Image (cartoon, rainbow, N blue to C red):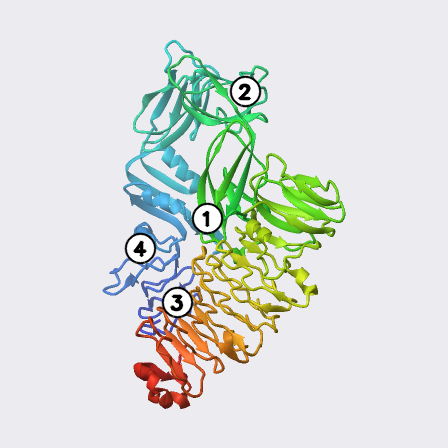
Amino acid sequence: MDVRNCPNLTEPLDLSGCVNLEEVYAEGTNISMVVLPEAGVLHTLHLPASIVNLTLKNQTNLSPNPSPQGEGSGLVLAGTENIATLVLENMNQIEPWELLKSILSPLRGLNRVRLIGIDAEDSDLETLRTVAGLQGVDEHGLATARAVVTGKIFISGDIYQSEVDELNGVFPELEISGNILSDPVTTFTFTSNKSGETLGGTSFLCSHPFVKIDGTTFAVTAAPGTVISFTFSADKHQDRTANYTVTTSRTQGYSVIYLPLVTFTFRKTDNTPLEGVIASPQPPPKEGETLVSDANGQISFRATGLITGTAEHDYGKASINVTVSGQNDQAFTVVLQPFVQVRLRAIVENVPVRGAAITFNGQTYGTDYNGFTPSIRASAGSYESSCTYQGKMKTFGVYVGLSDSFTEVSMNNMQIAFSQMDFGEPDGSIQVILNTASAITVNSTNANYVIDWGEGKETAATGTGSQSYTPPAGLQQVKFVKIRNCGGITAMTFPAYSVMALLSVGDSKLDYAVTYGLSSSTFNNAFSNLRVTGSDVFKAGMAKPSVDFGSAFASRTSLLFVQAHLFDGLNVTNFQQAFHGCSLAESIPEGLFRDAVNCKNFNSAFFSFGNGNLAGLTLDPQDLFPAVPDANIGNLFNSSAIKRVRESLLAPFVSVISATAVFQNCTKLETAVIPAQIPVQANFFNGCTALEWVEFKHAAPFVLDASVFGNTNGTFVIYVPDSAVAAYKAEASWSGFVSRILPASQKTV
């Protein structure tokens, strides 16, 4: 059979019926195996490197290449790296053991071996050990869990009886002969390292069979090179675990360490013994054992060296850290520090932080509307803790003493955005955040209200009319106060500078929608440190014909955040300087002035607004103004933190009578689109040093006042309608900007 150099031939070549076949040439093909007769007269077999299964049975004329039949005859293998199954039965003339070794060196994919009737010789047992780890094939060609090798093998080097016995267990029909030596005997002996101490209660666990001579002597028979693993145990002593490599017959002695008796006495801080203390020493005396102190507050066990761990009881907790040295029994006293209640609180700019995550002693706790975690049980000591809110994390230390304690973590300077804080929702109660321990005054037509000071403290109304209430002792200075059943309340008076946030007037009749908004002396004084307003604080103004909010929040430099819908439903006629000087404010809610359809005066409404806000934000207001004619928007955003002016910001104004210095000194302003109906008057963009581009929608050029772009950079671009580019460049007042005037169609952002 000659199929040489047929690379597309990949299927097994089945020649099982060709009993008189003498020669097979298959080099240059990609066949995976050749199926030959169970016996035959084959003398030449050339196979490609693609062979996966090499099975030869009773082909007595086949010999290694070259064979007696002449040059080119015999068994020729182009490669053996792909052979996974090797079956050789009664094929000693091709030296099956040497063929096997050539395939195993190096071991590639060979995993099944069947060698029948071998007569082989080797220098050692290494190859036989390797084959013992492979799978095999039975007489029917089915897979077996172990390789099959029968016949005989002679080992020229020294071998040991235990090795032969082990391999005979794998290959019972293989005769192993050679210079078989008796295995060495290793005798292990153990003594205490404490003089005069007798070892009792001993045990010996070993990886190999052994003979117990007495309680401290054990004999193991094993071949040289064998690793014997053992653990010796004895009362009052540390377990001795070791690995020993056999060489020759010998006695190997080991000393075991005596463990002195260690007694711990656990006490309270007043020296009273504590029964029932659960101790967890490391290393543990016995794996899984729980140690509990007795009526005398004691536990005892044997140990040496460094002992660490914890001791815990309903009373308190302590750390264990002692060193046991020498061989004498030793005693230690451990005083448990009592558990106390720890409260943690998150606060920013004197406003409680709701929903912060505070990690203390490995546990994380959420904060409530007053910024508090639940009470936490802890023992005395110092703890590294952290507070995470809005993705910002601050680490801080907490020291816990022998009494209940409170720790407040300030998130100031962490760029917390008040506009993203959770202040809860109106629920019919008056909600206010106060920073005072002084009394507040309530005027009410009934005595149904209840003041919830937080922290579980409440005060019921003491009568109608004007009543004064002092916060209960023990409360923190800053507190989230709710007044429930407040329908009869008509007025409230707070201490000077005490109101941090007015979040809701609830169902009360409180009226802060007075002429000039917050201009009354009482409101100004108490609310000078106001940080946050709620959305319903001016709802009393809905019943009024009109409300004037000129200078309402003027110079409130502490104001950080204004809730949306603050002016909804109100007929506001004046917003001049409404938020003038609110430098820390961080955002303008969408639609804030949307309902003020009768208001024309917005002059300086956001003068200096947000230019020093703590969250590092810049303004991008949208859908802010109503559609009104004849509006005054002079100085509207002068010196504010506005970053971008969309066309929609000023587009609602039907007409404008004053627009001087609208964006003067807005040093963060980068881009602006100015609708056609907005007159660009003196100082409109003066001092806007960060300008990148401005687009004017005016179809025809207007006379440009020299101050409009005063004190700006020299690189910003001016976009105008495509049809008006030439006219703008021709207008004399624009002569200084000719090179920067471009058609709006070229704007890419």
Mark 2 or 3, closer to the camera: 3
Circles 2 and 4: CB atoms closer than 8 Å: no
Alpha carbon distance from label 1 to label 2: 40 Å
The answer, for residue 455, to whether it is visible in the render is yes
Alpha carbon distance from label 1 to label 3: 28 Å
Q: Which mark is residue 268?
A: 2
Which quadrant of the figure has residue 538?
Answer: bottom right
The crowding category of the residue bearing disc 2, from other C-alpha atoms within 10 Å (few below 14, some 14 to 19, many at least 20), is: some
The answer, for residue 172, to whether it is visible in the render is no
Residue 248 drawn at (x, y percent)? 30, 26
Sequence order check, earlier mark of 3 and 4: 4
Check disc 1 and report the residue beneath it.
412
Q: Which mark is residue 94?
A: 4
Mark 1 or 2, closer to the camera: 1
Alpha carbon distance from label 2 to label 3: 68 Å
Mark 1 or 3, closer to the camera: 3
Q: Amino acid at mark 3?
A: Asn
- Of helix, strand and loop, which one carries label 2? loop
The crowding category of the residue bearing disc 1, from other C-alpha atoms within 10 Å (few below 14, some 14 to 19, many at least 20), is: some
